[in-house]
């Protein structure tokens, strides 16, 4: 498990000026919202989940893509998605950036990715408590190590449950460069400093609008 303890940075004289704007009551409401609406989502989208699973069964490889990500308090968890890439995408064990992964997308996977339907299985992650509907996108340790070489601010991300969507997702898109990773980090820390239940609702509405309007992100 990663050390996410902010106090050790204070003892070393490093910045500790970012704190979660959500208090216990709002965090409780946020978690209740996640539980209720992840259940509703799983029920409403179950026909799509079944159809997509059947289609992927006829493709070579697993239906569900599983990958370890780093989440709340620096704890690793398994994220679930519909598989969108060929099974040889990371044969050499080296994680690929988004621009590199696009070369390995299957035809059906490209459709799922374009409409963000590959992320439907993350409703299960939300229900389990690994994730929230709104929060910083969870990253792999490989890329966190690269970010840590540029800044020590990534530790603040461990104060939040990772999310299915975020301001950074909407306005910064997929992170395929280090500059984008650092920009996403800025968005996520700003969210930490200012988040409320109402800002979460605003992000959800913006995400839904972006998906149905066909915006690429």
Image (cartoon, rainbow, N blue to C red):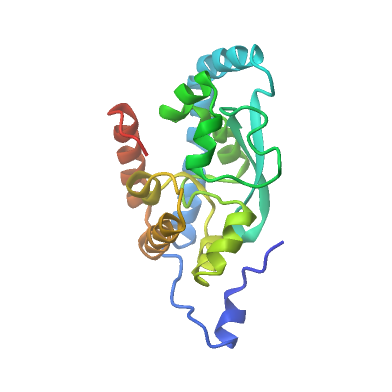
User: Which of the image's four quarters has the N terminus?
Assistant: bottom right
Toward the viewer: 134 or 172? 172
User: Which of the image's four quarters has the C terminus?
Assistant: top left
* Residue drawn at (63%, 60%) of the image: 74
Where is residue 72 shown, x and y percent of the image? 59, 56
Where is residue 14 shown, x and y percent of the image? 52, 83
Where is residue 190 shown, x and y percent of the image? 37, 63
Task: Work out whether 15 lies above or below 73.
Answer: below
Toward which corner of the image does residue 78 lie, by quadrant?
top right
Horizontal arrangement in the rendering, residue 126 relative to residue 92 (left or right) = left
Toward the viewer: 171 or 78? 171
Horizontal arrangement in the rendering, residue 13 relative to residue 62 (left or right) = left
* Residue drawn at (58%, 38%) of the image: 127
Task: Work out whether 24 lies above or below 97.
Answer: below
Horizontal arrangement in the rendering, residue 104 relative to residue 205 (left or right) = right
* Residue drawn at (44%, 72%) of the image: 18
Task: Work out whether 133 lies above or below 15.
Answer: above
Toward the viewer: 62 or 195? 62
Toward which corner of the image does residue 60 lie, by quadrant?
top right
* Residue drawn at (31%, 38%) of the image: 205
Task: Work out whether 14 lies above or below 165.
Answer: below
Count of numbered labels shown in the rendering: 0
Where is residue 79 shown, x and y percent of the image? 62, 40
Toward the viewer: 151 or 49? 151
């Amino acid at each position: 498990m990663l050390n996410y303890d902010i106090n050790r940075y204070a003892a070393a004289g490093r910045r500790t000026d970012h704190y979660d704007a959500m208090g216990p009551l709002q965090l409780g409401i946020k978690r209740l919202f996640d539980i209720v609406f992840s259940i509703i989502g799983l029920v409403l989208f179950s026909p799509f989940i079944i159809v997509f699973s059947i289609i992927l069964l006829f493709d070579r490889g697993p239906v569900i893509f599983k990958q370890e990500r780093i989440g709340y308090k620096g704890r690793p968890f398994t994220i679930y998605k519909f598989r969108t890439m060929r099974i040889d995408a990371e044969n050499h064990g080296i994680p690929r950036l988004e621009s590199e992964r696009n070369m390995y997308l299957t035809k059906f996977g490209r459709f799922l990715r374009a409409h963000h339907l590959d992320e439907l299985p993350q409703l299960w992650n939300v229900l389990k408590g690994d994730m929230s509907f709104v929060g910083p996108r969870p990253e792999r340790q490989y890329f966190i190590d690269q970010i840590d070489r540029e800044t020590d601010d990534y530790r603040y991300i461990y104060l939040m449950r990772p999310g299915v969507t975020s301001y950074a997702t909407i306005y910064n898109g997929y992170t395929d460069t280090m500059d984008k990773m650092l920009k996403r980090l800025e968005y996520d820390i700003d969210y930490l400093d200012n988040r409320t239940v109402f800002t979460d609702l605003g992000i959800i509405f913006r995400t839904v609008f972006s998906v149905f309007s066909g915006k690429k992100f």
